[in-house]
Image: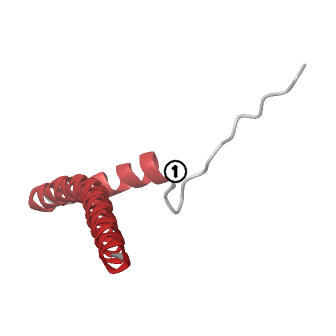
Amino acid sequence: MPNGKNNFKQKRILKFLLKLFVLTYFTFLSFQACCYIINNLKKEKELDSLKRNLNSKVYDNEKLKQQIETGFTDELIQQKARDELNMVGPYERVFLEVATDD
């Protein structure tokens, strides 16, 4: 009979190991699925950011095309240089008002 007890113990151990293996395998699969979902969410955020950036560039490109079609006149270029870049013409004088604490 001692041989029958050993067979029973071996079967119990094998069942336990099989259950442990199945549990470990499903845990691993669950972890992999979570990693896939997280990675997918990150990629979706990155894609949204790239789409916004693309839309901004397309808008800027359309504005530039429109400016090219209407033509850059010397007056327009000078006005943009004065307003946006604080530039002055070659023979212009700039007067700065200095405030004093009187």
Residue 75 percent across, percent down from the top left: 29, 53
Residue 53 percent across, percent down from the top left: 26, 57
Q: Nearer the viewer, residue 29 or 50?
A: 29
Residue sticking out furthest to the top: 102
Q: How many marks?
A: 1
Residue 77 percent across, percent down from the top left: 32, 57
Left or right of 21: which side holds 97? right
Crowd around label 1: few <14 · some 14–19 · many ≥20 (10 Å)? few
Q: Quadrant of the N terminus?
A: bottom left
Left or right of 100: which side holds 45? left
Q: Residue at x 36, y 49 (%)?
A: 79
- Compared to residue 11, the image places residue 50 above or below, namely above
Which amino acid lies under the numbered mark 1 shown in the image of this protein? Asn
Query: Would you identify the image quadrant in which residue 81 lies?
Result: bottom left
Q: Residue at x 66, y 42 (%)?
A: 95
Residue sticking out furthest to the front: 1
Residue sticking out furthest to the right: 102
Q: Nearer the viewer, residue 9 or 4?
A: 4
Left or right of 16: which side holds 59? left
Residue sticking out furthest to the bottom: 3
Q: Quadrant of the C terminus?
A: top right
Query: Would you identify the image quadrant in which residue 14 lies?
Result: bottom left
Q: Residue at x 30, y 57 (%)?
A: 34
> Which residue is identified by label 1?
86
Mark 1: secondary structure: loop
Q: Tell me, what colour scheme is on the image?
A: secondary structure
